[in-house]
Image: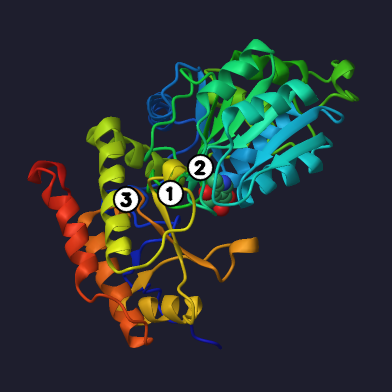
Amino acid sequence: MKKYKELNPSLRTIMTPGPVEVDPRVLRAMSFPILGQFDPEFTTLMNETMEMVRDVFQTNNQWSYPVDGTSRSGLEAVLVSIIQPGDKVLVPIYGRFGHLLVEISERCGADVVFIETEWGGVFDPDLVIDAIHKHKPDIVAMVHGETSTGQMQPLSAIGKACRELDILLVVDAVATIGGVPVETDAWMLDAVMGGTQKCISVPSGMAPITYNHRIEEKLLSRKRVERGLRDPERIDLAYDVNMIRSNYLDLSQIQDYWSAARLNHHTEATSMLYGLHEGLRILLEEGLEARFARHELNGKALVQGIKGMGLELFGNEDSKLPCVTCIAIPAGIDGEVVRSKLLHQFGIEIASSFGPLKGRIWRIGTMGFSCNQKNVLHTLGALEAVLIREGHALPAGEAVQAALDVYSLTSREEISC
Ligand SMILES: *Cc1c(COP(=O)(O)O)cnc(C)c1O
């Protein structure tokens, strides 16, 4: 019989835009004994998780809870639950994840129109608002932080325009939630989808989302309680052409499961919920403002370090996403060789990119538990060493010094190592 080795993953320094390192307290929470999904001890944890999700999304929305599955399950749950075949969906694209919103919307039967701007920048909000006036969509779907290009789209003016025109605005905030302000209510976002494995720093496997009464109205208009749970007399529910075309990701049923009624849907992912509960608890204990400041500071130190070694950033610095730094791979350097040496000689993982940027840029994440001074300094030192080894001429030693300058401008208390 084939023998398998005991699981013993290496301890890595993970500097990608997800998944990132996880606080040992979260890992410990995930190893606790299983509770039944209707056990009051467990439903209390579910309710507390909803409260904490509300705080992180800066919203009063009643419906704020995680969908089981990776972040993409949250995107798909919202889109499949609100898009009726033939609905017009406008997607402004400025990177790979905008394309994902188009892809999912098309599969939901939407009539999709998109506008695209060159990767490495974001939209002037007025351009998006003009497109909204021109196309008159039912729904606008947009990415807040594009991990593929390291860019962040300002949303408040677009939110206001959508609200005035009674259009639903749904936002992918997977990369930003928990690391950068996401002001769901103030920016008038109707639904916001997050992820666990980026700035929230919990393993991948859940997608915290929030949505308001405007979205809920749409869900309820399409509601169909599934066979086996519904009153068999309700034949009106049996052949509803409007019904949501996914069972697993049907938010109208999932919200019943998260409500006091606890109407059975899926079996909640017990250990993931423990992990998310602990991750959110740690996040709120740190405080949103302090957490945003930490992401800002380490992102800044990394940028100064990269510039200090003479490398060029990719993308518009004015709209840079604080938790992802994109670097142009210098001419004559094989980006994959450098990534491989960083991983195998230094235990540090950084990312490449997708589509038109494949082979052209590296992406370094400074997210969640990975976002700290030690990791930034190690990464800069290691990248410099590998580049020198690869024959790239650079001002040796400058990178770490430039980053240290950023840190030394900040008082010691604000630096978490
Ligand atoms: C990572 C990411 C996703 C996809 O998340 P998965 O957890 O891999 O499903 C979607 N959108 C954005 C902006 C992301 O950064």
Question: In the rendered structure, are the residues bearing label 2 and label 3 in contact, judged by CB atoms less than 8 Å apart?
Answer: no
Decide if residue 189 is in sight here: no
Helix, strand or loop for disc 3: helix
**Residue 299: mark in rendering:** 3
Specify the amino acid type for callout 2: Val
Decide if residue 357 is in sight here: yes
Residue at left 52%, top 18%?
Answer: 260
Which residue, given by chain and number where applicable, does mark 2 sit on? 174
Q: Quadrant of the N terminus?
A: bottom right
Q: Nearer the viewer, residue 41 or 313?
A: 313
**Residue 248: mark in rendering:** none
* Ligand 1 contact, mark 1 (Cβ < 8 Å): yes
Question: In the rendered structure, are the residues bearing label 2 and label 1 in contact, judged by CB atoms less than 8 Å apart?
Answer: yes
Which residue, given by chain and number where applicable, does mark 1 sit on? 198
Which of the marked residues, 2 or 3, is nearer the chain's N terminus? 2
Badge 1: how crowded within 10 Å, few (<14), some, or many (20+)? Answer: many
What is the distance, in whole Å, between disc 2 and disc 1 at their CAs?
A: 7 Å
Q: In the image, 65: left or right of 306?
A: right
Q: In the image, 385: left or right of 126?
A: left
